[in-house]
Amino acid sequence: MIRIEYPSYPYRIREEEGREFIFDELRRQWTRLTPEEWVRQNFLQYLVQTMQYPASLIAVERELRLGELKKRFDILVYNRQHQPWLMVECKAMEVELDNSVLQQVLRYNIAIPVPFMIITNGHYCAGFEKQGHQLQPIEQLPVFTN
């Protein structure tokens, strides 16, 4: 597992008609504050503040196609050449990071190949580097140098 120390951040949260919304700084929009969204927002701040990944090279919740299916990835980081580099699948904190979560990010990797794949539920984070046809566990997120 990868150890994550989330930075503090002054999240903007509002309530509307009994539902909470959080302002997503990267997408520049209010979005429904679900348990998964809370994990996603914290992980985004970790990537930008702690890991120093350029916010301009991070895509959040965009559509991808798997054959006839339309899916949405959580976080995709591009390298400086604008090639997909790292994909993150976020789950709510109560969701166990089991093989089905890994299989989900591997399916997404068919549509958008990346060398690094991360799965997280906020408490735990696991990462993998694709080397040929093998997946190697990694102990920390890769440093953004590309």
Image: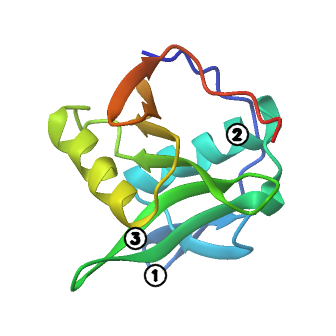
User: Which residue position is annotated with label 3?
Assistant: 72
C-alpha span from label 2 to label 1? 32 Å
C-alpha span from label 3 to label 1? 26 Å
Whether residue 32 is situated above or below residue 45 in the rendered picture: below
Residue type highlighted by circle 1: Glu
The label on residue 32 is none
Would residue 47 appear left or right of 131 to someone viewing this image?
right
Residue type highlighted by circle 3: Arg
User: Which residue position is annotated with label 2?
Assistant: 47
Q: First in sequence: mark 2 or mark 1? A: 1
Q: Secondary structure at mark 2?
A: helix
Q: Position of residue 77 (x, y in %)?
A: 65, 53
Q: How many marks?
A: 3
Whether residue 22 is situated above or below residue 124 in the rendered picture: below
The label on residue 17 is 1
Tell me, yes or no, if residue 118 can be seen here.
Answer: yes
Q: First in sequence: mark 3 or mark 2? A: 2
Residue ID at (74%, 74%)? 28
Near-viewer residue (27 or 76): 76
